[in-house]
Image (cartoon, rainbow, N blue to C red):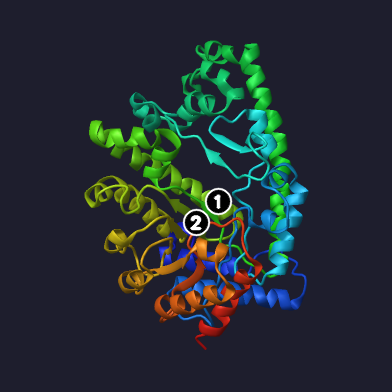
Amino acid sequence: MEKKWGELSPGEKREERFRRWLSPEGVKFVSPEAEELYRVRVTRLIDVIKLQEPDRVPVSLPADFAPAYYYGATPYEAMYNGETLRELWKRYMREFEMDIGVPPGGVCSGRVLDILDNRQYKWPGHGLPAGATYQYIEGEYMKADEYDHLIQDPSDFWLRVYLPRIFGALEPLRELMSLTNILELPPVTASLAPYGRPEVQAALQALLTAGREAAQWDGILQELGRDTLELGIPSMGGGGARAPFDFIGDTLRGTQGIMMDMYRQPDKLREALDRIAITEISRAITGANDSGRPVIHMPLHKGADGFMSEKQFNTFYWPSLKKLLLGLIDEGLVPFMFAEGSYDSRLEIIRDLPRGTVIWMFDRTDMARAKEVLGDNACIMGNVPASLLCTGTAEEVKEYCRKLIGVAGKGGGFILSPGAGINELKRENMLAMMEAAKEYGVYR
């Protein structure tokens, strides 16, 4: 008798997710060769996640706005013309041999941001020139005394507090009453009355208009995703999550706010971090189930060496992050952490996870030491310097990759990739990375 999903062990769930990733339903590959390449590439990724030796080291090439810059377009064009974006990214993936697809998941519709009057970012055409990329405007989008609201009812906090602060068009939503006030008949009229106000109806209309634009944008991204699969190129983008400390420190309280909270209200901060971990587990599971891919991307910002002490990392950053990671692992998912900056002093701490269940992408971490500490526990990825890829020669890039593969690729469990996002790049350096993997990264 076949087991139900809830009866499967974490390992069994992961194997089932790997099976679905390896054999996606409804994909019409452009050729039998593309279908075979897809299976080879996904198998290569599954092998390194499991800490086994694949046929060769897989390579992840730069993404971000790189396809736009590379073909002479601007980020503005990519953000305001979905068809242009689709053609640029398709062309990019056709030109370079891709082990892993580079979908434009971080490229948002500029029109959606315009309609909602986003106040949290500057972007091309809105505060920045057409050739620039995003610029985050950090601030206290949650006040120090609002932790209880966030902890007790995150959705209500988001609707009536956070969204009105970051979107000018949604500011009237702060006038709404909590929907949980509607209990049977007596409170219905008072709770719904604010929806009759003209300014609230204008805010809701802005949501509807943005929703129509977002649906069109999402349709283009889905078409691009199908295009990519049909070419035989897999994606590692199964869904996303945020480290709880970064969730609060980046998005809500800001750097200054959360640093003050570590001293002024540490218990309340830890309670909120645990609450966010639960919501992020749910969000990531939904993304993976919708996409059919098991890998959950997680950029880590404020846990790097030098940002906080080891004691603070163990008190505030790691416990809630570990709770999140274990929750994802229990669901058969593969957390993929982009450890920005250096994690040299964190390696022994982050080793405390089940073997062969996660991917650590390192930016400036010592890869020899990362392999020594984590090599028998987790797949590691990185860390070809962005500066080298942008300004170095093909020979320099290939030599760096050769040495890196020799250190980090021993025994498998390694993906060759840049250490950080890159926008402006050299074609010959991209090719040099692939050549290095084929020449120096072959296991069998």
The answer to whether one can see residue 326 in this image is yes
Pinpoint residue 436: horizontal percent, then vertical percent: 55, 79
Q: Residues within 10 Å of mark 2 (few under 14, many from 20)?
A: many
Q: Which quarter of the figure has residue 173?
A: top right
Q: Position of residue 177 (x, y in %)?
A: 50, 17
**Rendering quarter of residue 6:** bottom left
Query: As displayed, is residue 170 above or below residue 193?
Result: below
**Three-letter code, disc 2:** Ile
Image position, residue 432 (x, y; %): 59, 75
Mark 1 Cα shell of 10 Å, populated few (<14), some (14-19), many (≥20): some
* Depth order, front residue of 355/181: 355
Q: Nearer the viewer, residue 17 or 352?
A: 352
Mark nearest the camera among 1 and 2 is 2
Q: Position of residue 138 (x, y in %)?
A: 46, 34
Q: Visible in this render: residue 331?
A: no
Q: Are marks 1 and 2 in contact (CB under 8 Å)?
A: yes
At x 53%, y 24%, the residue is: 164
* Disc ID at residue 257: none
Q: Nearer the viewer, residue 150 or 182?
A: 150
Outermost residue to the bottom = 444
What amino acid type is highlighted by mark number 1?
Answer: Gly
Classify mark 2: helix, strand or loop: strand
Residue at the (27%, 37%) spot, across then down: 262
The tag on residue 287 is 1
Q: Which residue is mark 2?
A: 296
**Sooner in the amino-acid sequence: mark 1 or mark 2:** 1
Q: CA distance from mark 1 to mark 2?
A: 8 Å
Residue at 71% across, 74% down: 34
Q: Indicate the quadrant where residue 168 lies.
A: top right
Q: Does residue 9 lie above or below 299 as drawn?
A: below
In the rendered image, the vertical position of residue 261 relative to residue 183, given as above or below: below
Image: 209 above or below 300: above
